[in-house]
Amino acid sequence: MALRSIAEDCWQVVETEGASLVVEAERTIWADSRRLRQVLENLFRNAIEHGSTSPPSQAQEDAVEHGGAAVTVTVSDLPDGFAVADDGTGIPEDEREHVMDVGYSSNTDGIGLGLAIVAEIAAAHGWTVDVCESDAGGTRFEITGVEFVD
């Protein structure tokens, strides 16, 4: 699967609310195409739903209420995988180890399945998902252990 083309296709089916996508990924990976689409769509939705439309002082409250119209999502290559990062409000460090758990949601209306599905699909492919802060202060999901097509 060419990561660039599948990321761009997935972006078209997600309600992006004016958010923007930057695809820096150039690699082709071995993956079940349907499941890879689920991973990307869920990560995109998470970035948009929890991104910010306000200055940092109001970002967390506004992101949960309104979603992230101004968020930028970037898909990039890693030496052994790929990353999906955003410039939203980020996930507090003490919550990062739990965000992939079934039922975890920072939104009172959320059911906590999106990122749990990402973790399940990654595990089925033999991948690892790490959650960290993006260079822009948002969230970065690093998916590693990916097999590339040469």
Image: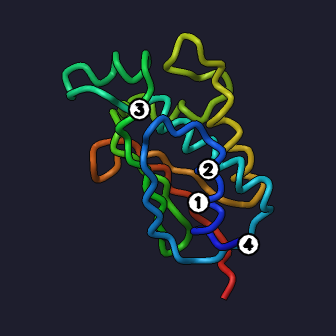
- Residue at x-position 57% and y-position 51%: 129
Q: Quadrant of the N terminus?
A: bottom right
Earlier sequence position, callout 1 versus callout 4: 1
Camera-side mark, 2 or 4: 2
Kind of residue at badge 2: Gln
Number of residues whose C-alpha sits closer than 10 Å to that of mark 3, classed few (under 14), some (14–19) or many (20 or more): many
Q: Is residue 91 above or below residue 139?
A: above
Residue under label 3: 68
Q: Which mark is residue 8?
A: 1
Q: Quadrant of residue 138?
A: top left
Number of residues whose C-alpha sits closer than 10 Å to that of mark 1, classed few (under 14), some (14–19) or many (20 or more): some
- Per the model, the C-alpha gap separating discs 2 and 1 is 7 Å
Residue under label 4: 30
Earlier sequence position, callout 1 versus callout 3: 1
Q: Helix, strand, or loop for circle 3?
A: loop
- Residue at x-position 49% and y-position 50%: 141
Q: Helix, strand, or loop for circle 2?
A: helix
Left of 25 or right of it: where is 101?
A: right
The answer to whether marks 2 and 1 mark residues whose Cβ atoms lie closer than 8 Å is: yes
Kind of residue at badge 4: Trp
Left of 20 or right of it: where is 119?
A: right
Earlier sequence position, callout 3 versus callout 4: 4
The answer to whether marks 1 and 4 mark residues whose Cβ atoms lie closer than 8 Å is: no
For the view shown, which residue lies furthest in the top direction? 108
Q: How is the image coloured?
A: rainbow
Q: Helix, strand, or loop for circle 1?
A: helix
Left of 33 or right of it: where is 8?
A: left
Q: Which mark is residue 12?
A: 2
Q: Is residue 92 above or below residue 86?
A: above
- x and y, in percent, of residue 117 in the image: 71, 39
